[in-house]
Image (spheres, rainbow, N blue to C red):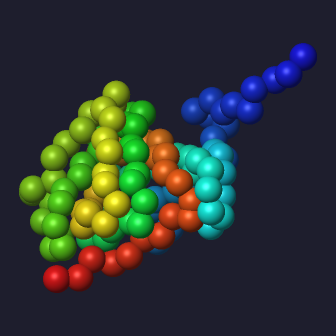
Amino acid sequence: MCEPIAWTPDTLPWGEPAPDGVCRAPLEGNAAQDGGAVIFAVKIPRGAWSKPHAHNQDVRVFVVSGVYRLGYGAEFTSDIARAYPAGSYLLVLATIRHFDGADEDAVVFVSTGGPIETHAATG
């Protein structure tokens, strides 16, 4: 019998937290390799925000728990970030400058293609 590769909320393979407390759990694929799906979970603690950035690939975000916030532009302004509650799905297009975070703890699943690169937004 073949068993699925699966995790429950309690068994996600969270890595070490970044300085802002954000944790990632790789679920499928290799973000550095060309081709194929890359899927990972991101745990965003209350008050954590990314700096404005863009990706070289489209990124799909599914909000699993909490409220995820996303804003567009090269300058960070949290008050323009729109709130997306659990169950929301977002498609962030490649090269579009954006920033994201949470005002309450949130978990999102992210799907993209490899290789995925993140570039700081400039003017």
Residue lying furthest left in this view? 79
- Whether residue 57 is situated above or below residue 39 in the rendered picture: below
- What is the quadrant of the N terminus in the image? top right
Q: Position of residue 8 (x, y in %)?
A: 63, 30
Residue lying furthest right in this view? 1
Q: Position of residue 21 (x, y in %)?
A: 45, 62
Tell me which residue sits at (24%, 52%) in the image: 70
Quarter residue 75 falls in? bottom left
Tell me which residue sits at (42%, 71%) in the image: 118
* Residue nearer the viewer, 63 or 102: 63
Q: Is residue 9 visible?
A: yes
Number of numbered discs on residues: 0
- Whether residue 78 is situated above or below residue 64 in the rendered picture: below
- Whether residue 47 is situated above or below residue 83 in the rendered picture: below
Residue lying furthest bottom in this view? 123
Residue lying furthest top in this view? 1
Q: Is residue 82 left or right of residue 88?
A: left
* Residue nearer the viewer, 19 or 33: 33
Tell me which residue sits at (33%, 35%) in the image: 89
- What is the quadrant of the C terminus in the image? bottom left
Q: Is residue 113 left or right of residue 63?
A: right
Q: Is residue 50 visible?
A: no
Tell me which residue sits at (62%, 63%) in the image: 34
Q: Position of residue 50 (x, y in %)?
A: 32, 66
Q: Position of residue 51 (x, y in %)?
A: 29, 71
